[in-house]
Image: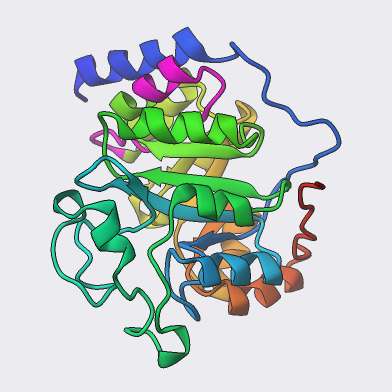
Amino acid sequence: MKTKKLFTFLYILFTFCGCQTTEKPGVELPKRGLCAHRGAMGTHLENTIPAFRAAVEVGAHMIEFDVRLTKDNRMVVIHDSSVDRTTNGTGKVSELTFSEIRKLDAGSWKSQEFAGVQVPTPEEVLNEMPLNVWINIHIKGEGELPVMIARLVEAKGRLHQAFLACSAEAARLAKEAVPGIKICNMDRQESAEEYVAATITARTEFIQLLKKSDYSDFAASVKQLKEKGIKVNYYGTDSPEELKMLFGAGVDFPLVNNIVQTIDAARGLGIEPLKPVFQTK
């Protein structure tokens, strides 16, 4: 294990945990369920408004999306470091301006039904989210980005439900700016066991485990985490059989690509679709 890296991470969490209450009265968040990975990406355009709306509509319990910075330091929701795969453009996100990216067609590669859909901003995505769904924001970068997204989450009144899936350095920067921001520890160590142990010591709100074969005793690792109050995400599967195993082992939120299909599998395991609650104006 890289000792310096671990101590940095522990310092971040011990320094900032518990500094600010982030509960929202009257809002109950899911105890377990399915996380729609990049929205309903199996049937819609990943990381776009149609995909997030579809995930909300079918009752996802958690919704994940990715955030990057453009050349002119604007936040956009996109997974890849380039726009090549998911738009009709080419080039790195970091080398394109916000205006250039917004002019791209992020839909026709999937289907003409979605032609003209834009790469969204995090603010646009948050505006689509119910108050009672977990919001899993995967930070693709450090520097200014963690601070910007943490402040946006705070400004939009989403501290009770949103968390940043990020590195230790990104967590440090976000926590300095917004102490109440929740963190999913994505600062994986040299072994799965060290990753679990470091997360327990650091007391983050979430962890994201990988394939169960990475863990010598998967159920025991999950049990350890749950006993410390850490919510367990898992990447990832659409298999009904594997979902049954994961929930049986105590995993809280498996990430799925086809939420439209797998929500029925969850219902068969006694997990009902979320009934969304939206902000009243």
Can you give x and y, in whole percent of width and height, for residue 281 in the image? 80, 46
Range of residues picked out in magenta: 172-191
Residue 196 located within the stretch drawn in magenta:
no
Name, please, the residue furthest toward the right: 26
Vertical comparison of 270 with 260: above or below:
above
- Residue, x 57% and y 47% (percent of image)? 135
Q: Quadrant of residue 4?
A: top left
Side of 141 where 210 appears, left or right: right
Closest to the observer, 220 or 31: 31
Side of 72 where 58 appears, left or right: right
Closest to the observer, 2 or 256: 256
Q: Is residue 70 visible?
A: yes
Vertical comparison of 54 with 137: above or below:
below
- Residue, x 47% and y 70% (percent of image)? 257
Name, please, the residue furthest toward the bottom: 112
- Colour theme: rainbow
Vertical comparison of 213 with 138: above or below:
below
Closest to the observer, 224 or 184: 184
